[in-house]
Image (spheres, rainbow, N blue to C red):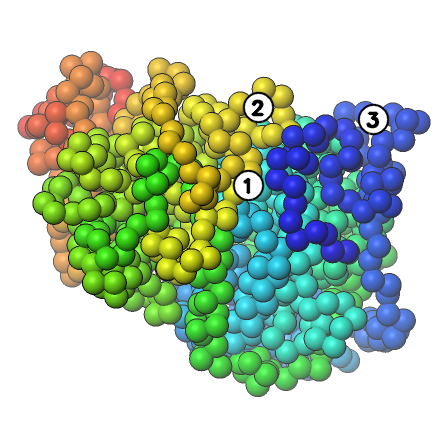
Amino acid sequence: MKVSSKTFWAGCASVLVLGLAACSGTSEDNDKDAKVDSKVELVPGEINPSIWPTVKTPALNADVEKRIDVLMSKMTLEQKVGQVVQGDSNSLTPEDVRKYKLGSVLSGGNSAPGDLPYADTQTWLDAADAYYEASLDSEGVEVAIPIIWGIDAVHGHANLSGATVFPHNVGLGAANDPDLIRRIAEVTALELSVSGHDWTFAPTLAVPQNDRWGRGYEGFSEDPEIVKSYGGEIVVGLQGEVGADDFMGDGKVMSTAKHFLGDGGTINGVDQGNADISETELRDVHLAGYITAIEDGTQSVMASFSSWQGQPMHGQKELLTDVLKEQMDFKGFVIGDWNGHALIPGCTNVDCPQSLNAGLDMYMAPDTWRGIYESTLRHVKSGEIPMERLDDAVRRILRVKINSGIFEKPKPSERAYAGKTELLGSPEHRALAREAVRKSQVLLKNNDNTLPLSAGSRVHVIGAGANDIGKFAGGWTLDWQGGTYPNSEFPNGETFVNAVKREVDAAGGTFSYDAVGDVVPDNIDVVIAVYGEDPYAEFMGDRDNVDFTPNDLNPERLMEYKSAGVPVVSIFLSGRPLWTNPEINASDAFVASWLPGSEPAGITDLLFQTKPEYDFTGRLSFSWPKNAMQDKLNAIHPDYDPLFKLGYGLTFETSKNMGELSEESGLPENMVAPKGVFFEKGQTLEPWRFAVNDSHVNMPFNAGGIKIAGYDKAAQEDSFRITANGGGGMVSIMSGYTLDFEREANGKVELSFDIKNLGGSSDVMIGSNSTRVAVPTTGEWQEIRIPLACMDNLNYIRHAFAVDMKDGMDIAVSNVKLAQESGNGLSCP
């Protein structure tokens, strides 16, 4: 099914009433099917499949089904069990595939062949060939089943060196252009084919309803109509159109509609949390994109980490089987998410018959694949998993594999586009990315017609992010969390600094750049300030509120330029709308740039209006908050009172002056001091970042004999590990500007952190600013408290936590924060 290429921005969202399908964007037949039958009694916690929409899906191919019958008649029980298990390439060898006859391999966000979480084309192809050839080893079996390899190519194939990095979905939603989305999917599929991949875990069809969620930028919009208009287009772009000659042909890959269902509706936007919403809201808001994706033949659907009314989706039979497979007639297979089956009560990472019985067809068991294989085989033999259920799962997987052409294709390195690195970041692909950036920019303020700028003027750019492709690209770029690599790792991208300089130089203007921006130069006509969120992914990006805390440029610095009579143009980088009233007040023009990727020239096209037809066409696909507590801010909910409504966005012609905005954040008093938390849940908190010898770096970091990497304490990578091997120096958690902690010291506050010694001297010199205290450490985790009063220059704190690393030292640290005096603090030196 196809929907209109333009949705009615404010219209649909403003009239949608939860509990009705009137604005869900379904076809007439689906609207009729989706309405609540007055005879159906809705019971909280129960799913009523009859009130969910039916979907017209492609009919089964009789020849394919007969082929499956023949294959399954020749497969051993062990082979069948192997088909329903997927392991991660970091924990799985080709020999394992050969021995266990596994059905699939994935490479997670930090998994790639080699020492890095990303790889070049040949390295990927070599690994792909090895897994593929191992799966075709027929020793001991009557028939061999080829493996399929999946990866998260969520905004381009961003784990492949040189690939095109497109804007994240949060920006593409603002473009409101389904045709553009299909073309991006086509390019992504082609670049995936270069590295030998068969399958991408995309599109994400979440409808984020709370901006605190760390995965919000993976969603296109809070408006289900926009998500619905994109779902099928992405599937067609990746796979080709069902029935057409190019369906799953050369340059095409399998798609995955994810995460089914309600991942964008959890309480407080908590990642992997609980969507405590009604069945009708679950259907009318969160199902929208799946309708078109399934109609257009997505080959797989991924179950969500999240729960609905306390029921983990990996075990929700009524939704996975009764609704998805039966009512909606989905004929592909359901893949799990990263050990998501373990969230079901009674399950573990290595044992969960409940999930397969509920309708999961393939376990994603990245590092626990062997255990899940062994327990599943045992449960099938005992009858706890009925043979009929296993056969259905295997049939679905084989159906998709046959549809994909994998049985007829040669090994990955010999396929049509394999190894054609000239396609990666080709001029055509970069032009498409640039178009996507241009169409996704949303102009929120343009006082005194500050924009467009004259490229022939004296242009000054400030902000470290302006010269950092990783910050523009966000999470899921080269690695899971993103933002950790030098610009040289993006050979087919460019920085914002370079894009601006090119335009200014060509027009005969004057260009200058200062990452810090703390000095207002003489004789400049305008300053372009680039700042925003640092990269994150998944739960690492969950927040307590939607207040933007500056991490390098702050409003006071911007006001210095305004006070000097220099117009300020702000380019705000973020994965969600955030409360930025102070920054907007300090700007003459303010652009919501989202996470635009590797082609910032799409921004400069607009700033300088490089062609007469270029104007801001992006419109908010997420409502913009009026205060920092408006995290659940959606046009479909009551008490809707945003600063900028869904669909808002200025053009050069519609710009009008905006008055001063309130700078009352609305935060409770106990939330107004984020400066007191420096590192938690595996990440530094704005404005704090890791630094080595006074230079900001991103984790993971490995240079000059110092290595900073994630480390597991109570959860995956919730801590950090610092290793000095062949070098040394100061490693710190440092702000981009000074903060005043004198009041906290007077209040008997301590610097608190957990530490574990992994090697080297047991006494570690730790403190803040230039003060150091000898901290005794052991091989076990222990909490350390240092009185803040011990530190020097408390009214000018830049280094909240600093450790002097000497060669051979190896420590792990977690939970770095300020805490009330405990009475157990160390003595001051």
Q: What residue do we see at 35% from left, 15% from top?
A: 669
Disc 2 and disc 1 in contact, CB within 8 angstroms: no
* CA distance for labels 3 and 2: 27 Å
* Kind of residue at badge 1: Ser
Mark 3 residue element: loop
Q: Position of residue 647 (x, y in %)?
A: 55, 38
Label 1 crowding class (10 Å Cα cut-off): few <14, some 14-19, many 20+?
A: many
Nearest the viewer among 334 and 195 is 195
Asked where in the image residue 343 lies, by quadrant, the reply is top right
Number of the label disc, if any, that sits on residue 747 = none
Residue denoted by label 1: 621
Q: Position of residue 312 (x, y in %)?
A: 66, 38
Q: Is residue 238 visible?
A: yes
Mark 1 residue element: loop
Q: What residue do we see at 57% from left, 85% from top?
A: 414
Q: Nearer the viewer, mark 3 or mark 2?
A: 2
Number of the label disc, if any, that sits on residue 42 = 3
